[in-house]
Each structure stands twice: as structure tokens, then as C-alpha cells.
Image (spheres, helix red, strand yellow):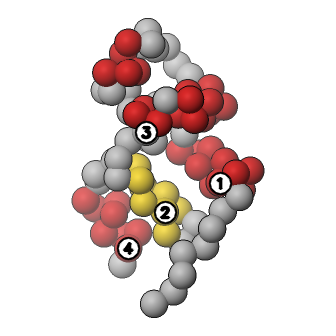
Amino acid sequence: MTTPKSHSAPESSRLYLPDATRGTSLNPKSPAFKAMGFKDRELTAAEALALMAKEPNLIKRPLVVAGGEMVAGFDRERLRALLA
């Protein structure tokens, strides 16, 4: 069994930044997202990361990181491929 690698905050941001835009790790179906009035607004990756840091309920779950890749939300095929 291998021990998961711990990431520093800046390193984690680089890891997650490509997937931080709407439709990937940010959950636009979240009641918190809708309440914030972002329903029809396109967010930059930096804006999405800032929102997720402020309001963790905006992050899709599960959030799985393996081998330097991340899958946010329950996507059976992507999770199988990532964990194979």
C-alpha cells in the first residue's frame, strides 16, 4: 500500500486549476451556487477556485485525486479509468 502524496496549497491549486471551471469540479447545481447568483455567468478558473475555497459546498463530490489527475463528481467511467 502506498501513502498518498500530500500537496501544498500552491501545488494543489496547480493540480486542480485545469478542472476548476464550471462543469468540472465546481458544482453549478449546488443551492449555494444558485443563491450566489452565478447561474448564467462564466467564471474563470481563478474565480472558481476562490469560490470553492470560500464555500466548500460548491465542490462536486466525490473528489478523487490519483496519479496527478483528478475526477470531480460521480463519473463511473472516469473513476474506473483513474483507479485502474
Question: Residue under circle 3?
Answer: 59
Q: Residue furthest left?
A: 76
- The answer to whether residue 2 is seen in the rendering is yes
From the viewer's side, name the closer residue of 47 and 53: 53
Nearer-N-terminus badge (4/1):
1
Q: CA distance from mark 4 to mark 3?
A: 20 Å
Which amino acid type corresponds to the residue marked 4 in the rendered image?
Answer: Leu
Tell me the kind of residue under disc 3: Ile
**Reading the chain from its start, which is encountered first: label 4 or label 2?**
2
Circle 4 residue: 83
In the image, residue 14 above or below residue 65: above
**10 Å neighbourhood of mark 2: few (<14), some, or many (≥20)?**
some
Q: Quadrant location of the N terminus?
A: bottom left
Residue 68: name its quadrant. Answer: bottom right
Helix, strand or loop at label 4? It is helix
- Which residue corresponds to mark 2? 65
In the current view of this chain or complex, which residue is farthest to the right?
A: 10
Q: Nearer the viewer, mark 4 or mark 2?
A: 2
Q: Is label 1 in a helix, a strand or a loop?
A: helix
Give the distance between the C-alpha atoms of the residues marked 1 and 3, in whole angstroms: 14 Å
Q: Work out whether mark 3 precedes mark 2 in sequence or the reverse, and give the earlier one.
A: 3
In this view of the protein, can residue 40 be seen by the observer? no
Horizontal relation, residue 3 to residue 29: left or right: right
